[in-house]
Amino acid sequence: MGQKMDDLSRIPVSHCPKVFVQRDYSNGTQLCFQNKFPQDLDGKIDAATFQETISTLNRMYLEAETLNSKTYCESCMACLTAYLSYICFDTHYEKMLKKIRHYIDEQNQNVYVPRGLMLIDPVERGLRVLEICVLNDSTGGR
Amino acid sequence: MANTKVTHSAQSDSSNGQRSADSNKMQRKWEIHPGRNKFYCNGRCVSSPDYGGFLCCMGLIIVTGGLFFAFDCPYLAVHVNPVIPVIGGLLFIFIIGCLLQTTFIDPGIIPRATLPEALETDRLFQLENQNQENQNGSGYAAPRFKEVEIKGRTFKLSYCQTCQMYRPPRASHCSRCNNCVERFDHHCPMVGNCIGRRNYRYFYLFVTSTAIMCCYVLGCNIAVIVLRAMDTDVGEAFKKSVASLIEGIVCLGSLASVGGLSCYHSMLVAREMTTNEDIKGTYNEKKFKNHTNPYSQGNCIQNCCFVLCSPRLPSLLDRRGFVDPADEENQGVQISNSVRV
């Protein structure tokens, strides 16, 4: 598994055509991507699979950002230690980002790369867009 | 790599001249950061280019705190209660912790768009504007913006020419640091950083706890002088407690500025607004008809919890990541130069 993931990261992505999924701001600044199926992906992947991925991602981001008892305790703990605890511990958000990276890797492995697509983790693009690379453009656009 | 783009290499050559000479080591991303921020500890800490205000602030806190612990605390611990220095010490540590967090963490800088993303945004803009330009025909380039609806209210996202993207809602470009910052509050020269989404809570706690500390020290000073005056006469008491007098003057001065600021920011926190929005009057009833703040969580207690306790967001700058030599987006010319030499 780990070996395969390494292979994925070596796929050159700087020259291939890209599709961008923009942020959805209708609920405020909460991190959420637009669930609309982009036209450019037509014929490469079915809409249901794509939307399933996006809504799973959105759900995970929501879990990372919402204030629940666990994150509340975490913030209060950090406050009591004059914010020195952040040096030692990973925050809830960071753990979620790792989870999301795993999920994206797994989705790439099982769903997207076999169809000639690849998701780029939004963290690498400042959480502003979800970038999808079209690896082998069958229309010969390259 | 036949890259002839030499835009950013000139200014950075001087800063990492000796670095490229001694090694072909991988370059970290903070070294090619396009903004004006300063980085410390190999990219772990970020601050704005000017740190004079921070040093001044820190000096004032340490000197006043030092005088308080050296002269007032021993007297009060013996004559009143040994808890007094303990409370003072805890407050002091808390203030220093908050100040360091405010100054040295990333305030929420939004990384600039990569080349393909910027091209895509451009392409969409051209497509959209083709018919509009035919209509007005003049060469006047209107400011670019995109409209989004947030909880029923329409907001304009303006395009940032420097960062080559539409600024997310509440973000603004800091001209001092030359970056877009999320939930931009203001650029604070006193703490030497922008105040944004990531460090607003530390800034607020710093200001508030400093105000409390000022009151506390002031109270202790008065107690010391009064107690000494009761032991001996008034003139003698003042003569003995010169340090207390100095602290008192500093604290009164700081309290005048910090106290007001603290009240103002408490109001903003309760309404979940930023200074920037307050100045612009984004939610002003007189300026706009539909004035409600879409970011408010409901009531003021929920707003306070949200601002002070919501999960700490990760930094969007991958400062310590290595520059990928294959990545053309990251001004590949620097790397190709150092390899060739």
Image: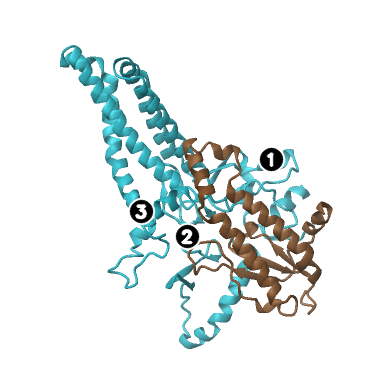
Between B172 and A91, the one nearer to me in the picture? A91
From the image, tell me which residue sits under label 3. B270
Please tell me the colour of chain B. Answer: cyan
Query: In the image, is residue B310 above or below residue A135?
Result: above
The disc, 1 or 3, on the residue closer to the chain's N-terminal end is 1
Q: Which one is closest to the eye, mark 1 or mark 3?
A: 3
**Which chain does the brown colour mark?**
A
> Residue B199 in the image: x percent, y percent?
47, 47
The disc, 1 or 2, on the residue closer to the chain's N-terminal end is 1
Check disc 1 and give the amino acid type.
Answer: Arg
> Residue A124 in the image: x percent, y percent?
65, 57
The residue lying at 36 percent from left, 67 percent from top is: B292
From the image, tell me which residue sits under label 2. B171
Chain that bears disc 1: B
Q: Quadrant of residue B19?
A: top right
Chain that bears disc 3: B
Check disc 3 and give the amino acid type.
Answer: Ala
User: Real-space Cα distance between discs 1 and 2?
Assistant: 35 Å
User: Real-space Cα distance between discs 3 and 2?
Assistant: 20 Å
